[in-house]
Image: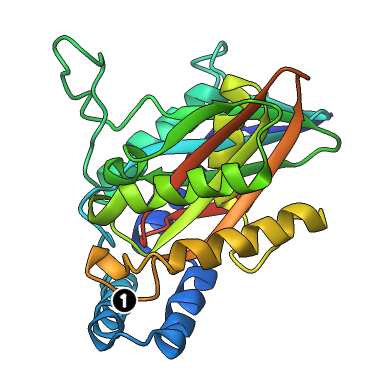
Amino acid sequence: MRKIPFEKIVSTVKTLCVKSCYELPQDVIAHLKASTDSETNSGARKIIDQLLENADVARGERIPICQDTGLTIVFLEIGKDIIVEPPADSPDATIIDAVNAGIVAGYEEGYLRKSVVAEPLNERKNTNTNTPAVVHIEIVPGEELSISVMTKGGGCENKSRFKMFLPTDSKETVIDWIADVVEQAGANACPPFVVGVGIGGNFEKSCLLSKKALLRNLDSKNPQSFYAKMEKQLLEKINASGLGPQGLGGDTTALAVLIETAPCHIASLPVAVNIECHAHRHASAIL
């Protein structure tokens, strides 16, 4: 069994939090730059240029891309042959504790806005640490630990939707609903978007799939040709809406549509849409 020190996880998560908030991933930058070539609206091109300039300034001056530095979502793929070695003074500490400690350190040292309230409906007092994180764990073969951090803003997350379709509903019916969800998100979710779609599983699984889809490279395609074609159809339909960058008109409403699927019950067809703004912030590391 391979041992990974608790503090190694803390320092890695800290670094990923700051990196994700300061540095827009290169695939997102590339898609924004490419969209300026295909965009026919001069005002939309100007907005995209401003978004690229903002990302460049954030990276160069080491400041957040956006003032909303997000709720921290962490995906852990834990090799079955590893053990997290807790600190001597906290023998019962878990990998979740390490993740949250890394977030506390990253948000403090990176001067990132802390946006988490401890209780959702009554007092809504800020925890002042941006913790606890939302953590998703998957056990995988091997002796590596994969950590992916997504700093997800509230404006785009609020526009995400779920629907339980009839199993007899057509692909076209699902496409129309997804495109409508994206169009209804409008300017409040800060387009151009990256759109994660989860199809299948059950109520909670489809939502998780839609969030996990956002970790994919924007140039990737679903491995099944049916869904790869559906991704292309959805992107074309969404961009034909004319919503455009920042909702001010244009051809570039979305940069990519990414679909993930799972088996589901014969009586169900769950579909979830998780919308990400143009500041598509995430970073990963493997220990």
Q: Nearer the viewer, residue 284 or 281?
A: 281
Residue sitting at x 29%, y 47%: 69
The reply, left or right, for residue 126 in relation to residue 84 is left
Query: Horizontally, is 197 left or right of 189 in the view?
Result: right
Task: Indicate the position of residue 252 as horizontal and vertical percent values.
Answer: 40, 72
Q: Percent from the top left, x then y, of residue 44?
A: 28, 79
Residue at position x 61%, y 39% in the image: 198
The image shows residue 26 at horizontal and vertical percentages of 51, 72
Crowding around mark 1 (Cα neighbors within 10 Å: few <14, some 14 to 19, many 20+) is few
Colour basis: rainbow
The residue positioned 26% from the left and 17% from the top of the image is 118
Marker count (numbered): 1
Compared to residue 153, the image places residue 24 above or below, namely below
- Point out the image quarter for the N terminus: top right
Asked whether residue 257 is in view, the answer is: yes
* SS at badge 1: helix
Q: Is residue 128 above or below residue 172?
A: above
Asked if residue 243 lies left or right of residue 149, the reply is left
Residue 8 can be seen, yes or no = no
The quarter of the displayed image where residue 239 is located:
bottom left
Q: Amino acid at mark 1?
A: Gly
Circle 1 sits on which residue? Answer: 60
Q: Quadrant of residue 138?
A: top right
Q: Position of residue 39 (x, y in %)?
A: 39, 84
Pick whichever, 242 or 26, lies toward us.
242
